[in-house]
Image: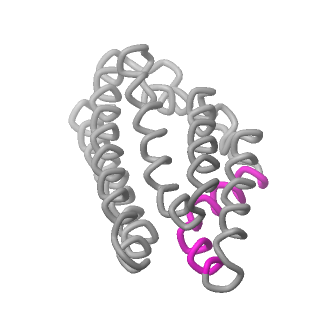
Amino acid sequence: MPTRPDLPSAVLAGLSILFPVIAIVAIHTVGPEAAVVAMVVLLAARLALPVLRGVPLSLSLALLPVLIAVLAVASFDRPLSIRLYPVFMNAAMLAAFAVTLWKPPTMIERFARVMEPDLPESGVRYTRNVTRIWVVFFLLNGSIALWSALQPGWAAWTYYNGFIAYAAAGILFAGEYLVRQTIMRHSGQ
């Protein structure tokens, strides 16, 4: 039976997803210091309370370097630390997913086994390929997030990190789901 998020974890996940919007509002209303404090508190809370029960420890611990990097950059440039947050998050996710390609089970296999503990070998191969796709996604997404962080003003950063990056991830997630359903239908599962 799949595990379900608890309320605190769901709230933290929602705040993480909305962080680019929250950051822009905070910067324009109370200043970058408050946005950095909110970001650090959010990261610390996510380290202490995994977003979903059963999420691999490596995925939760991947946030520690993000927290350290944010604090390091914030020590000399608070707005830049906010802009680089999506870059750091993508790097952390890239590392967490990529490591599992060399030290299986892969990240997607771990998630799949929550729903299907007796995943067949064909499912293991499929989840390995999906993990590779997510690694490429995090690399490209992080690169574009870095580009947006280095642009003057906040427009490119806000549009990309507050909307386009989430839309791209959603399209990848939905596309993978449709491909998986088609494969399962054709294999008779």
What percent of the width, then of the height, locates residue 165? 37, 62
**Left or right of 32 in this view: 186:** left
What percent of the width, then of the height, locates residue 173? 37, 51
**Left or right of 92 in this view: 51:** right
Q: Residue at x 66, y 77 (%)?
A: 26
Total count of labels: 0
Tell me: residue 139, above or below residue 58. below
Q: Residue at x 33, y 15 (%)?
A: 121
Q: Main secondary structure of the magenta part?
A: helix
Magenta span:
7-27
Query: Which image quadrant is residue 183 in?
Result: top left
Tell me the quarter of the image containing the N terminus: top right
Q: How is the image coloured?
A: one colour
Q: Residue at x 77, y 39 (%)?
A: 48
Q: Residue at x 56, y 61 (%)?
A: 77
Query: Which image quadrant is residue 91 in?
Result: top left
What percent of the width, then of the height, locates residue 9? 72, 50
**Magenta-colored stretch includes residue 104:** no
Tell me the quarter of the image containing the C terminus: top left
Front in this rendered view, residue 100 or 155: 155
Furthest-bottom residue in view? Answer: 29
